[in-house]
Image (cartoon, rainbow, N blue to C red):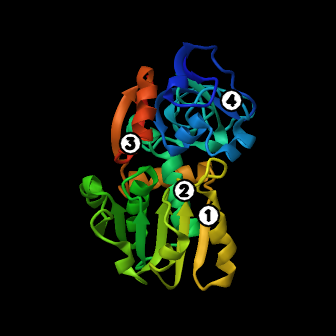
Amino acid sequence: MKAVIQKRYGGTETLELREVPVPVPRKGEVLVRVRAAGIDRGTVHLMTGLPLVMRLVVGLRGPRQPIPGRDLAGTVEAVGEGVTRFAVGDAVYGTGHGSLAELTRAPQDRLAAKPASLSFEQAAAVPVSALTALQALRNAGRVAPGQRVLVIGASGGVGSYAVQLAKAFGAEVTGVCSTTKVDLVRSLGADHVVDYTRSDLAERAHEYDLVLDIAGNRPVRRLRRLLTPTGTLVIVGGEGGDRWTGGMQRQLGAVALSPFVRHRLAMLFSRENSADLVTLADLADRGAFRPAIDRTFDLDAAAKALHHLEAGHTRGKVVVQVA
């Protein structure tokens, strides 16, 4: 089978398309024939091996998982021992062990039936980013109907879902983005859109019950000024910082400060699970959200897809068509 392989950390020059053996599903896993694979900022971090602290988990000198990518949508090709939730031929979506390949292993507890209303390409854009948005709003943010929610980074992969899901939960949503992406964020259903290149967020002091800062680098003290006296700040990911910890210092500092202030300050590490994938499939089939897909690439252009994402100009999600 064909797969994108990476043996060392670096840029897109480290990726190459090769013929590799077909993987065999282990206990509790299924073998998925990948129809489409989504990529996100996490895929870029795993490619570059930055921040360096992550290499303690994913491999010191090179990635332990040589095939990049996690998001996928496809059909079940075979099932491993103990698999009871899926059968050969089922259309599924979720996360697997290297989705930039024609076939990949995936744990059954990280898969769900593909939303009937979404194509394979659309479904592949959902898992990691939409799970993160859902858990940031519901679990960490405790969003409630009628609240005023600010989404910083509203045009990205996670942000595009956060805007739509916050609206589905009954919130009044303000999205923050750059000039070229204002139309996208407005089309996602945001009640208000702020172009950060033309407006200063500091002018909106004490307005929001919940602020989601997605992959940003604004100081926590500035973000707190946007909150109502008992509002909540959720930091989702983070860019910038040093090579060792990246944006994690800001997140950890916010969590350490939280017990001493009236604001709730939280960070999020999303958890991939089938229950939330089922929830998202139901929301999609009820029309609560639609994936915003920026561009689609073929498998042999996966390096170009990652370069496009790394450049930071994407509007929503980037998808690789495999089959």
Sequence-first tag of 2 and 1: 2
Question: Hey, which quadrant is residue 101 in on the image?
Answer: top right
Cβ atoms at labels 2 and 1 below 8 Å apart: yes
- Nearest the eye: 261 or 98: 261
- Nearest the eye: 80 or 24: 24
The kind of residue on which mark 1 rests is Gln
Q: Classify mark 2: helix, strand or loop.
A: loop
**The C terminus sits in image quarter:** top left
The disc at residue 269 is: none
> Which x, y percent locates residue 322?
45, 25
Sequence-first tag of 4 and 1: 4
The residues tagged by marks 2 and 3 sit, at their Cα atoms, a distance apart of 29 Å
- Nearest the eye: 166 or 87: 166
- Residue 11 against residue 259 in the figure, above or below: above
Residue at image coords 35%, 65%: 175
The residues tagged by marks 4 and 1 sit, at their Cα atoms, a distance apart of 26 Å
Q: Which residue is mark 1?
A: 251
Residue 101 shows in the view: no
The kind of residue on which mark 2 rests is Gly
Residue at image coords 53%, 53%: 240
Sequence-first tag of 4 and 3: 4
> Which x, y percent locates residue 292?
35, 47
The residues tagged by marks 4 and 2 sit, at their Cα atoms, a distance apart of 23 Å
Q: Nearer the viewer, mark 1 or mark 3?
A: 1
Q: Residues within 10 Å of mark 3 (few under 14, many from 20)?
A: some
Q: Residues within 10 Å of mark 2 (few under 14, many from 20)?
A: some
Q: Which residue is mark 2?
A: 238
**The N terminus sits in image quarter:** top right
Sequence-first tag of 4 and 2: 4
Q: Which residue is mark 3?
A: 118
Q: Residues within 10 Å of mark 4 (few under 14, many from 20)?
A: some
